[in-house]
Image (cartoon, rainbow, N blue to C red):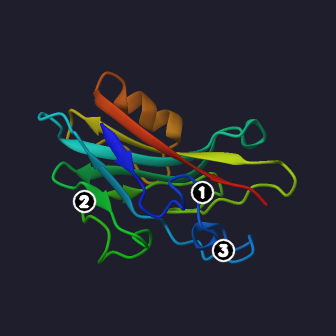
Amino acid sequence: MKVYCPALLSGKHIPNKFAHITVQGGQNISPPILWGEVPPDTRSFVLSIIDRHPAAHNWIHWFVINIPRHYREMPERASGYRERFPAAAQEMRNSFGDLGYGGPHPARGSGMHPYEIIVQALSIESLSVGPFSTPQECEEEMRGKVLATGSTTGFLQR
């Protein structure tokens, strides 16, 4: 699978408007994400954005499950807006403890943080978990059902 985020400046830098409100210029807007080259037997997708910097300990900024199989994008500002968000999809709790998107907020002076945007194609229509399920519970439910994974990475520092 191929994953693309058209908002990344020069193909790799996250604009501040997508950052957490604690970052100068941060508006906590979820970025646009597109994916393609999907296996034909895909029944749903899972999307996540994870800070892979060692100091962040795989901090989850966005985790969305049950995206219907006919979707190939998550539009900008989809998190928190039902009219922009796939009806069957479900936003899970992020590492801030909130449902939905929580923008990047790298610690000052910690260097460049890599934010991996991941889309996974699943062989099932939906995961049988609730909105407050842990990422580990979701991963367990997904075990053996992932058909393909694609990712891209954006970077931010302050």
Residue tagged 3: 26
Secondary structure, mark 2, is loop
**Of the residues under marks 2 and 3, which one precedes in the sequence?**
3
- Whether 97 is drawn above or below 59: the answer is below
143 horizontally vs 116: left or right: left
Q: Which residue is mark 2?
A: 88
Location of the C terminus by quadrant is bottom right
Q: Amino acid at mark 1?
A: His
Q: CA distance from mark 1 to mark 2?
A: 31 Å
Identify the residue shown where x is 47% and y is 47%.
48
The mark lying in front, picked from 1 and 3, is 1
Vertical arrangement, residue 43 with respect to residue 142, above or below: below
The three-letter amino acid code for the residue at tag 3 is Gly
Q: Earlier in the sequence, mark 1 or mark 2?
A: 1
Q: Nearer the viewer, residue 134 or 102?
A: 102
- Locate residue 91 relative to residue 41 in the image: left or right: right
Judge whether 38 appears above or below 156 on screen: above
Provide the residue designation for mark 1. Answer: 13
Q: Residues within 10 Å of mark 1 (few under 14, many from 20)?
A: some
Quadrant in the rendering for residue 82: bottom left
Which quadrant holds the N terminus?
top left
